[in-house]
Amino acid sequence: MNKTAFLICATGWGGLEMHSLKMFNWLTGNGQKISLYLTKNTTIHQKAKELNVPYTLIKRSRKYLDVYNAFLFAKMLKAKNEKTLVVFDNKDLDFAFFTKLFYKSLKVIYQQHMQVGIDKKDFLHTLRFNSINIWVTPLSNLKEQVISRTKVPSSKIKVIPYGIEVNKFNNVAESIQTARKKLHIQCSNVPLIGILGRIDPMKGQLFILMAIHHLILSGTKVKLLIMGDATIDHHEGKVYEQKIKDYISAHKLESDVYLKSFRDDVIVFYKAVDLCALASDNETYGLVAIESLLAGTPVISNTAGGIKEILEHGELGILYKPGDIEDFCVNVKKLLNNPKEMQTLTDKGRERAILKYTHVNECNEWEKMLNSIIQE
């Protein structure tokens, strides 16, 4: 069996970092031989310790040209006869490139977590990308983006959607009242809109807060739940978190907005809210959207990024124009005033999510890929 190394050096702890760790557990639970390599004092390092997940710490000195540490890493992989390296962060591609220079037969798989953004057809990007044997992307529109903005051949790109453990969302009898009680939220007769995710300017919590304020001023009875935390060592995130608190204080919204830290039993969040809102500037994938569909909670999202593909361009959720508070508010009012439409979205969304986004499907595809790549 192929022996594989997972390299996860991200400092944040968002949905995609969580998913990488879950995938490690799923695949090793299925018998795959995988080693986990982390860097010291990152959040994922702390989580791995808490969960008793086996790991090895490696040194990283810089984003680019970390040649000596790449040499040491390559030596470690060779000694363990690990022939495949899976990279989850584009910031680690330079490191993977040098690792492969010192370990010529190493196969590199890159799981894309971020959008490509601007064109990356220059010499240096092409050099790094050429070291990748398989580029895994979660959505077909992201595959098209990679093809158009890089020189990576389409034959190297494989679409594997991120999966969710569907059984965790099955037969959850928890009522909306019970879920809100767990979160210490008092708004039994008022619609609650929620946004879940890392506190970060890119996630758009402040936009949703301003939109909810606009709804309240227009006479719509509604409250907001913001659940998540800023990354510990991310200054911009901490500043943004303070901006949110300052806005709440300046507009006297303390009784209308609930700020809660992230919790592992996220099903409580989805069961507590009437509507899950997303406002990321350019969300690559949107695991929150899929979890919300599985939990039976309707979704409203802007059209930026990959979520519109997950919501099938409005078939499974409501879409609004990015940054447009008025459009957001119009769609929220429309949805809250049409419970039949909300129920239709809920039923259709859950049905499609169960078919397309299970972790069993994802693991099966990864196992096929890991078992076959070494034979190339």
Image (spheres, rainbow, N blue to C red):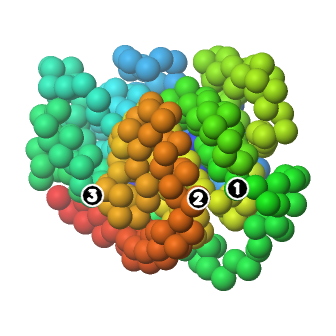
Q: Position of residue 68 (x, y in %)?
A: 43, 20
| Of marks 3 and 1, the one in the foreground | 1
Quadrant containing the C terminus in the rendered view? bottom left
Q: Nearer the viewer, residue 67 or 214?
A: 214
**Few, some or many C-alpha atoms within 10 Å of disc 1 (few <14, some 14-19, many ≥20)?**
some
Q: Secondary structure at mark 3?
A: strand
Q: Position of residue 329 (x, y in %)?
A: 53, 42
Q: How far is the residue under mark 3 from the one under mark 1?
A: 37 Å
The circle drawn on residue 191 is 1
Identity of the amino acid at label 3?
A: Val
Q: Nearer the viewer, residue 155 or 169?
A: 169
- Disc nearer the start of the sequence (3/2): 3
Q: Secondary structure at mark 1?
A: loop
**Few, some or many C-alpha atoms within 10 Å of disc 3 (few <14, some 14-19, many ≥20)?**
some
Q: Nearer the viewer, residue 40 or 10?
A: 10
The answer to whether 349 is drawn above or below residue 218 in the figure is below
Identity of the amino acid at label 1?
A: Pro
Q: Are marks 2 and 1 in contact (CB under 8 Å)?
A: yes
The circle drawn on residue 159 is 3
The circle drawn on residue 43 is none
Q: Position of residue 52 (x, y in %)?
A: 73, 55
Residue at x 79%, y 32% (from the top left corner)? 253
Identity of the amino acid at label 2?
A: Leu
Q: How many numbered marks, from 0 up? A: 3
The answer to whether 61 is drawn above or below residue 265 in the figure is above
Residue at x 44%, y 40% (from the top left corner)? 327
Q: Nearer the viewer, residue 77 or 94?
A: 94
Residue at x 47%, y 17% (from the top left corner)? 62
- Disc nearer the start of the sequence (3/1): 3
Q: Position of residue 131 (x, y in %)?
A: 23, 37
Residue position marked by numbered label 2 in the rendering: 336
